[in-house]
Amino acid sequence: EAQLPAMPAPVIAVRHGILVAGLVLGLLGWALRALALFTAQSNFTHLVAHRKQANHVLVTEGVYKLCRHPGYLGWFVWSVSTQLVLANPFCFAAYFAVSWKFFADRIPGEEELLVDFFGEQYL
C-alpha cells in the first residue's frame, strides 16, 4: 500500500483556489460563448464569411453590446481555464500562447471584412 506525502495546508489552499478559479472562469467562458451563439443565431459560424450574404446582419444586441467578439473571448477564457482546473502550468502557458496567436491572426482580417460589409454601422 502506497501513501502520498502530506502537503502543507497553504499548498492545498492555493491548489484549491486555482481549481475554483479555473472552474468559475471555465463556466463564464462557456456561458459567454453560448450567449454569443444564441444571440447571433444564423450569423454565428465557425468560418469567416468573405462575401456578405443577403441575410447577413450586424448583431449589436445582447453580449455584442459588451464586446465585439464575445464568442472568441468566451472560447479563449474557457480554453485557458481548463488548464487551471488540471493544474498544468506548461499546458496553461501553451494554450494561452496558441489561442492568443490564433485570435491575433484571425480577428484583424475579420474586422476588415466587417468594415467592408457594414461600413459606418460597424465602426
Image: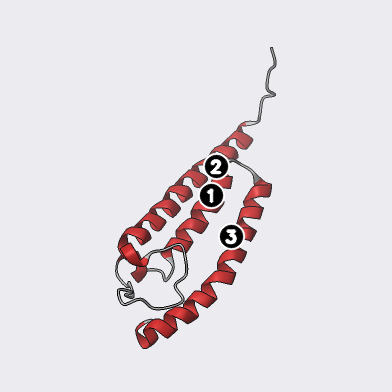
Contact? badges 2 and 1 (CB < 8 Å): yes
Circle on res. 81: 1
- For label 2, the SS is helix
Vertical placement of residue 50 versus 82, above or below: below
Circle on res. 85: 2
Contact? badges 1 and 3 (CB < 8 Å): no
- For label 1, the SS is helix
Q: Is residue 71 in view from this perspective?
A: yes
Seen as rendered, the residue at the extreme top is 1
Please say which color scheme the image uses: secondary structure
User: Looking at the image, which residue is at 45% across and 47% down?
Assistant: 24
Label 2 Cα crowd, 10 Å radius (few <14 / some 14-19 / many 20+)? many
Question: Label 2 sits on what residue type?
Answer: Val
Vertical placement of residue 57 versus 62, above or below: below
Q: Is residue 123 in view from this perspective?
A: no
Question: Label 3 sits on what residue type?
Answer: Ser
| Quarter of the image where the N terminus is located | top right
- First reached walking from the N terminus: tag 2 or tag 3: 2
Residue 113 position within the rendered picture, expressed as x and y whole percent measured from the top left: 46, 80
- Taking depth in this image into account, of 23 and 118 the one nearest to the observer is 118
Label 3 Cα crowd, 10 Å radius (few <14 / some 14-19 / many 20+)? some
User: Looking at the image, which residue is at 66% across and 29% down?
Assistant: 7
- First reached walking from the N terminus: tag 1 or tag 3: 1
User: Looking at the image, which residue is at 41% across and 69% down?
Assistant: 67
Circle on res. 52: none
Question: Label 1 sits on what residue type?
Answer: Ser
Circle on res. 99: 3
44 relative to 94 in the view: left or right: left
User: Looking at the image, which residue is at 64% across and 43% down?
Assistant: 88
Residue 83 position within the rendered picture, expressed as x and y whole percent measured from the top left: 58, 46
Vertical placement of residue 55 versus 82, above or below: below
